[in-house]
Image: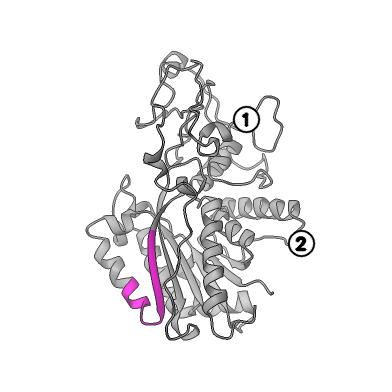
């Protein structure tokens, strides 16, 4: 069966693309404006592909701002001007203007406008299916929700559209990260009585409330693992092991002073504005790294490393970033990404729906 081609927008480090590649899709075009993010994308995905014996070199296809790329150019670069019968568009427009912790400028903000542009590109390119990812504020902010619903309504002229809020923690990622996902399938390719899209089933439903998560304890204090909590949902599963030697494992920001203040921060104290210390037997709060403000290691006097942060996002160790890349950029691209296991499960659900319902699909 031939792999279904996808166009990737706002590609970042390629975590969403990686999930789709693992599920059997083929990324044939990608867009990322930041040149360092583009370099990370190429390095990480290509090293992963090599480890899987996949003969594919990944590279960002177009580095121009998406608002400056017309749809005809995208189709020409991706398909030499001729669209295949079945292909998709995936992407997560930058979400700071919809973040409940950000400026909340919504669709009027510079980043918020990109969501509008992405939806316009869907209407112009008319992919067989699309996926959009964004923060819950997209439907949570009073001034953003009606605009978003109007945009989705416009898509419903041509697409069967479903949206859902999913938490990565429920899919085996040691991080509570809620995001809105919107999927759409071209009605002209669907049977008249097409079924509802079935979202992936959580591996750990209601994980936030299901387990008796530990609270806080003094830094450096010995802690026993609660017997009922799956280790893969705990930060401990992501931390460097004794004598472990893998790429990016020892890359972390060094401290210069204030040790006494740091060691007074309890393990599990993540409600702070800064210097959040993770708990080894809890999930991480949503990764949001900026200005070198990276979460503290639970029981070592340091911040978590690049590899540990990648693991908290569910990125395999075979995704390797060069040590020459600026570390601030590494953490930024990591925090922007979609957790790979969640992306993979959504991609599998999309693929199942296509196989069952798309008229003329020969897979």
**Left-right relation of 309 to 160:** right
Residue 286 x, y percent position in the rendering: 43, 42
The N terminus, quarter of image: bottom right
Q: In front: 229, or 130?
A: 229
The tag on residue 153 is none
**Is 257 drawn above or below residue 151 in the view shown?**
above
Label 2 secondary element? loop
Query: Residue at position x 51%, y 26% from top?
Result: 225
Which residue is most to the front?
228
Crowding around mark 2 (Cα neighbors within 10 Å: few <14, some 14 to 19, many 20+) is few
**Left-right relation of 276 to 86:** left
Which span of residues is magenta-colored?
152-164
Q: Which residue is mark 2?
A: 55
Which residue is most to the left?
142
**Distance of mark 2 from mark 1, alpha carbons?**
30 Å
First of labels 2, 1 by sequence position: 2
Query: Residue at position x 28%, y 72% from top?
Result: 150
Q: Is residue 313 magenta?
A: no
Which residue is most to the top?
260
Label 1 secondary element? loop
Residue 304 x, y percent position in the rendering: 54, 31
Q: Which residue is mark 1?
A: 240
Crowding around mark 1 (Cα neighbors within 10 Å: few <14, some 14 to 19, many 20+) is some
Q: In front: 108, or 282?
A: 282
Residue 26 x, y percent position in the rendering: 64, 67
Rendering quarter of residue 182: bottom left
**Could you tell me if residue 222 is visible in this image?**
yes
Q: Is residue 163 magenta?
A: yes
**Is 9 drawn above or below residue 266 in the view shown?**
below
């Amino acid at each position: 069966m031939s792999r279904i081609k996808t166009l990737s927008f706002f590609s970042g480090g390629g975590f969403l693309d990686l999930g789709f590649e693992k599920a059997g899709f083929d990324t044939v075009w990608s867009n990322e404006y930041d040149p360092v993010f583009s370099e990370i994308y190429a390095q990480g995905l290509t090293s992963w592909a090599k480890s899987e014996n996949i003969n594919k070199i990944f590279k960002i296809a177009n580095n121009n701002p998406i608002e400056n790329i017309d749809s005809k150019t995208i189709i020409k670069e991706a398909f030499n001007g001729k669209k295949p019968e079945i292909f998709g568009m995936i992407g997560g427009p930058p979400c700071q203007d919809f973040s409940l912790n950000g400026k909340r400028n919504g669709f009027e903000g510079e980043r918020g406008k990109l969501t509008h542009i992405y939806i316009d590109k869907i209407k112009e390119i008319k992919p067989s299916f699309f996926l959009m990812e964004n923060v819950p504020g997209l439907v949570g902010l009073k001034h953003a929700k009606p605009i978003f619903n109007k945009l989705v309504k416009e898509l419903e002229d041509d697409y069967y559209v479903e949206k859902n809020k999913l938490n990565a923690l429920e899919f085996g990622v040691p991080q509570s990260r809620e995001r809105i996902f919107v999927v759409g399938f071209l009605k002209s390719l669907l049977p008249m009585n097409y079924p509802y899209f079935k979202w992936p089933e959580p591996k750990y439903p209601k994980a936030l409330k299901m387990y008796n998560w530990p609270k806080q304890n003094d830094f450096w204090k010995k802690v026993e693992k609660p017997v009922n909590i799956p280790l893969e949902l705990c930060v401990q599963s992501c931390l460097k092991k004794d004598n472990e030697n893998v790429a990016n494992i020892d890359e972390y920001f060094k401290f210069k002073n204030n040790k006494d203040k740091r060691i007074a921060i309890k393990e599990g104290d993540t409600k702070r504005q800064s210097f959040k210390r993770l708990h080894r037997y809890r999930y991480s709060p949503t990764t949001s790294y900026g200005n070198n403000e990276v979460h503290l290691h639970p029981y070592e006097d340091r911040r978590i490393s690049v590899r540990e942060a990648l693991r908290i996002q569910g990125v395999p160790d075979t995704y390797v970033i060069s040590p020459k890349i600026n570390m601030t950029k590494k953490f930024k691209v990591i925090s922007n990404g979609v957790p790979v296991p969640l992306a993979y499960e959504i991609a599998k659900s999309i693929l199942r729906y296509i196989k069952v319902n798309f008229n003329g699909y020969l897979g």
